[in-house]
Image (cartoon, rainbow, N blue to C red):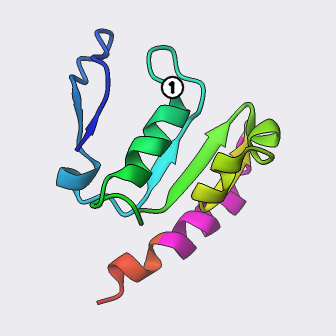
């Protein structure tokens, strides 16, 4: 589990369940109102259960983020507005191994 502050607006609570939900990938915005996307990324990479989970960043600051050291920790970066066909292909490519059994 990754600990996050409570989001009173949506009732998300203090635990984020990428591990318990069995996520195949994480879509991450870096600029959220109550949570820092950079902190989430670091928590994902620090936790053994989510260390290798593919992370796709979708953010208005994607161009700036690509020059950050943290950009090396994600599998793809997309600026907003989202190029949906490219995004869907990337998501398919990153998650196909999880469904190939």
As drawn, which residue projects farthest toward the left?
A: 20
Q: Is residue 87 left or right of residue 29?
A: right
Assess disc 1: are there few (<14), some (14-19) or many (≥20) residues with their C-alpha within 10 Å of its C-alpha. Answer: some
Q: Considering only vertical position in the picture, is 56 above or below 8?
A: below
Reply yes or no: does residue 68 show up in magenta. Answer: no
- Give the camera-side residue of 97 and 88: 97
- Magenta extent: 82-94
- Say above or below: 58 vs 7: below
Q: Position of residue 87 (x, y in %)?
A: 64, 57
Q: Quadrant of residue 96?
A: bottom left
Q: Is residue 97 left or right of residue 81?
A: left
Residue at far top of view: 8
- The quadrant of the rendering that contains the C terminus is bottom left
Q: Which residue is mark 1?
A: 36
Query: In the rendered image, which quarter contains the N terminus?
Result: top left
* Coordinates of residue 15 in the picture (x, y in percent): 21, 32
Which residue lies at the image location 42% right of the left edge and 66% below the top edge?
A: 52
- Towards the viewer: 46 or 53: 46
* Residue 99 relative to residue 29: left or right: left
- x and y percentages locating residue 36 in the rendered image: 51, 25
Tell me if residue 87 comes above or below residue 90 in the rendering: above
| Badge 1 element | loop
Residue at 31% in and 19% down: 5
Q: Residue at 74% across / 44% down in the picture?
A: 68
Pinpoint residue 74: horizontal percent, then vertical percent.
Answer: 59, 57
The answer to whether residue 14 is above or below residue 63 is: above
Please name the predominant secondary structure of the magenta segment in the image: helix
Q: Residue furthest bottom?
A: 101
């Amino acid at each position: 589990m990754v600990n996050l502050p409570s989001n009173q607006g949506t009732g998300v609570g203090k635990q984020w369940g990428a591990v318990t939900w069995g996520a195949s990938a994480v879509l991450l915005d870096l600029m959220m109102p109550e949570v820092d996307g950079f902190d989430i990324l670091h928590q994902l990479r620090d936790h053994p259960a989510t260390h290798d989970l593919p992370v796709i960043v979708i953010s208005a600051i994607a161009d700036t983020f690509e020059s950050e050291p943290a950009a090396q920790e994600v599998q793809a970066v997309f600026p907003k507005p989202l190029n949906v066909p490219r995004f869907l292909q990337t998501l398919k490519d990153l998650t196909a191994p999880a469904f190939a059994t």
